[in-house]
Image: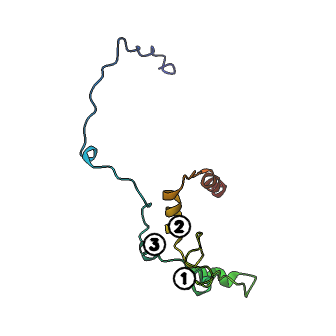
Amino acid sequence: AKKKGLPLPRKPRGRPVNRPRMEFDYDKVEARPATEPPLPSYDAAQNHTPNPYLNSNLTHEKIAAIRAKATIKDVNVDYSQPSDIYPESFPHFARGRDSLREYITSLFTSQLAIYDGAMGTMIQNYSKR
């Protein structure tokens, strides 16, 4: 209003009217806690299949093109571990044996977790440069 040279709008006078909240269909749905984040659509995530970390077996044409342009040849890109290196009772994540998604979900449901989004924001800002 100031930019256009118009008078400022009038302030409301009196007490605000307290109206009941409008009810929607989803208000009647019983709330239940989410124990796991939504799954991506690919089969490995749907079945909670652990990542084998055998990156030398990847045959996508973009990956093959990047490997062909690489100046350093014969680089080990496999990070697999034997699945029996840790016993089943080992309480922490074991690469190649456990599903990372299940492990993170169990941490978030069993312990108090502080999830900070600042790192993701920094990565996004870095990619904008």
Q: Amino acid at mark 2?
A: Tyr
Q: Nearer the viewer, residue 22 or 127?
A: 22
Q: Amino acid at mark 1?
A: His
> Residue 5: horizontal and vertical position, in percent?
49, 16
Considering the numbered disc 1 on the image, is that residue within a helix, a strand or a loop? loop
Comes first in the chain, label 3 or label 1: 3
> Residue 123: horizontal and vertical position, in percent?
64, 56
Badge 3 is on which residue? 45
Crowding at mark 1 (Cα within 10 Å: few <14, some 14-19, many 20+) = few
Q: Residue at x 63, y 54 (%)?
A: 119
Badge 2 is on which residue? 103
Q: Mark 1 vs mark 2: give the one in front.
A: 2
Whether residue 74 is situated above or below residue 9 in the rendered picture: below
Q: Mark 3 vs mark 2: give the one in front.
A: 2
The image quadrant of residue 126 is bottom right
Comes first in the chain, label 3 or label 2: 3
Q: Nearer the viewer, residue 10 or 106?
A: 106
Badge 1 is on which residue? 60
Left or right of 7 in this view: 98: right
Crowding at mark 2 (Cα within 10 Å: few <14, some 14-19, many 20+) = some
> Residue 30: horizontal and vertical position, in percent?
29, 49
Whether residue 1 is situated above or below residue 119 in the rendered picture: above
Way the structure is coloured: rainbow
Q: Nearer the viewer, residue 5 or 38?
A: 38
Considering the numbered disc 2 on the image, is that residue within a helix, a strand or a loop? helix
